[in-house]
Image (tube, grey):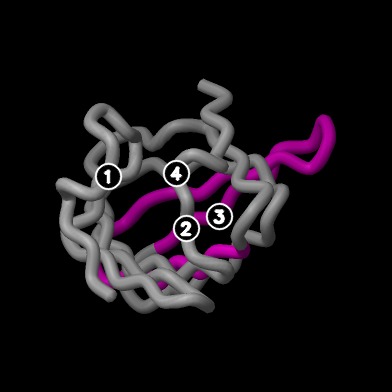
Amino acid sequence: MTRSLSDISPGTFFDPETWFVDEEQSIACVTLKGHGHLVRNDFSDATYEIVSGKGVFTWHDGETIFGVVVGTGDILDIPKGTTYQDVGDLVMLVTCEPPFDPTKVEIIR
């Protein structure tokens, strides 16, 4: 099933260009320009494939903050329960298993 933007609640932080979902996974093409929210998704594991651009992903492990610079062709796995943020000018293909549900993501800031 392919969902349109009208299926997503207005004002949500998740604003994909395209969104495919079935019982096992969701796949979205997401464009980021600037700072994404600091979030934690306790429901889905996510894989970010950088289609184009450059940016930085940071994630928190307790009191320690890690960061990685990403660019075209990079792939980053974010396990469910990880607090993270993305920053940059990026086009990303994001796969979530089980399917992404924006109502189950905590926006920390």
In the figure, is residue 78 to the left or right of 33? right
Residue found 40% across the figure and 72% down from its top: 49
Q: Name the element at disc 1.
A: loop
Give the magenta part as a residue range: 45-70
Q: Identity of the amino acid at label 1?
A: Ile
Other residues around mark 4 within 10 Å, as few (<14) / some (14–19) / many (≥20): some
Task: Point out the tag, 3 or 4, that comes first from the N-terminus.
Answer: 3
Who is closer to the viewer here, 29 or 84? 29
Majority secondary structure of magenta residues: strand
- How far is the residue under mark 2 from the one under mark 1? 11 Å
- How far is the residue under mark 3 from the one under mark 4? 24 Å
To which residue does mark 1 refer?
8
To which residue does mark 3 refer?
68
Does the residue at mark 1 contact the one at mark 4 (Cβ under 8 Å)? yes
Q: Identity of the amino acid at label 2?
A: Phe
- What x and y, as percent, mark residue 73? 36, 78
Who is closer to the viewer here, 34 or 43? 43
Who is closer to the viewer here, 9 or 89? 9
Q: In which quarter of the image is residue 15?
A: top left
Name of the residue lying farthest toward the top: 109
Q: Magenta stretch containing residue 5, yes or no?
A: no
Q: Which quadrant holds the N terminus?
A: bottom left
- What x and y, as percent, mark residue 34? 28, 36
To which residue does mark 2 refer?
100
